[in-house]
Image (cartoon, rainbow, N blue to C red):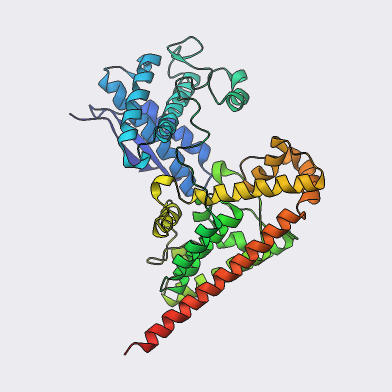
Amino acid sequence: MSQAFVEWVDDGNGRVPVFFDQRRCLVDVLHDYVEHVARSRQGAASPRGYASMVNAATYALLSWLRCLEASNRSWQQADDSLLKTFRDDQLKEVKRSPQSKGDERTAKRTVNVKLRWIYRFYGWAEGAKWCKGVIGPQRRITSMLTKEEHGEERHKSRGGADLYPLCFHGVDGGSGPQYFATTADKRRMLQFFAKATDPFLAERNRLIVELSDRIGWRAGTMTGLSIDDFLQENRRLENDDGVTVIPKVQKFGYRNSFQVPHSLFARVVRFAEMRSRWLAHRGWSESRAQRYLFVSSRTGRPLGHQTVVHLVGGAFRAIGVAAKRGAGHHSFRRKFADESTSDDLQARKLSGHSTAVEDVMHGTAIRLGQSSLASQAPYQRAVRDGTRDAEPHRLRRQVQELESTIADKDAIIAQLRHELGKRNKP
């Protein structure tokens, strides 16, 4: 039996889907909604961020369209009961997939993403006059999405319970297994990557680990880093903590700034020069690499959207950390957050500043780029001036510099051994 499906077209700014039902008839309302979503993301996110958002909306609505057809209903006839059936069926399906590893909490979070897109679609359709009386308080689909006065602030304060009432609650604050990378993990991973026979590949992978560990960047930001993000002209933005870098690719199109330690910034600059020589040696122009910092060692093209995730996840497996423990790229972000928060807490104790949870987490949130805290910047600057040079932070920076130096020397030794081995072969 045929099912609803999508075909992708390029509107000149990016790919958008065209929806067809099981009779191969166009479903214009779904296309119009995703096109609306696409327009809102164009210019506000990287090409990969744009594609991620559009794909998520598309496949959530495609699953919903198939559910509607299975129940012989039009999209305007939806109600809470059908939405609940869809939710429960999707949970069973996701739990069967290898990606969920059978973890119910992870599966529920995945289903929640789909449900939110469906709620947003109906909220948009109601506002755009595609339907009337389908979604709202005490309507067939219960939600406060159509009440602007109950919008974003309530969503933040109550986790969206009244906006998306059929979503699974209490599962979005984390996943099942959450592994925190350790210093020993990092050391073993750097040693593992240093064994690569191509010096460019070895340095690329080791630099990804260093930036993940010491800056805490998300995988999407890492993949989207450009050599333009590390131009020497950024030196005018340096201070005692390092050089201010504002990656062009950030979640939700944020423009948060991050402090990259001086030695690490210089190392990225050296790698960028190495990258240019490496490309030229293979006869590849910059147009192939598109100025992305991290490129494929096989093609010279930008790394794929999930490459950093797979790369670090595979390295964890190689050093003996089991996948079922939740070890992956995000483990370094957790490590960074844990160490940053711990250092701030100790620094605040030593300097006599507040140790209230919200105050301690404030500095970590800024370093992680989790939200815009511009309104609190003057206060934060005053606190940071009194804590950043405290003993915990000073020692942490010193240890990281020493670890980085040791890792560099290990890589050089590994490369020399490799070259010596080749020369000694008969």
The reply, left or right, for residue 151 in relation to residue 300 is right
Estimate the x, y position of residue 241 in percent, counting from the top left: 72, 58
Q: Residue visible at 68% across and 60% down?
A: 397
Q: Residue visible at 56% across and 63% down?
A: 227
Q: Nearer the viewer, residue 369 or 147?
A: 369
Q: Is residue 222 visible?
A: yes
Q: Split into 4 quadrants, where in the image is the N terminus? A: top left
Q: Is residue 44 visible?
A: no
Q: Nearer the viewer, residue 230 or 102?
A: 102
Estimate the x, y position of residue 376 in percent, counting from the top left: 75, 39
Estimate the x, y position of residue 40 in percent, counting from the top left: 52, 36
| Above or below for 330 versus 111 | below
Q: Residue visible at 68% across and 64% down?
A: 262
Q: Residue visible at 49% across and 55% down?
A: 223
The reply, left or right, for residue 239 in relation to residue 322 is right
| Above or below for 145 versus 205 | above
Q: Nearer the viewer, residue 330 or 10?
A: 330
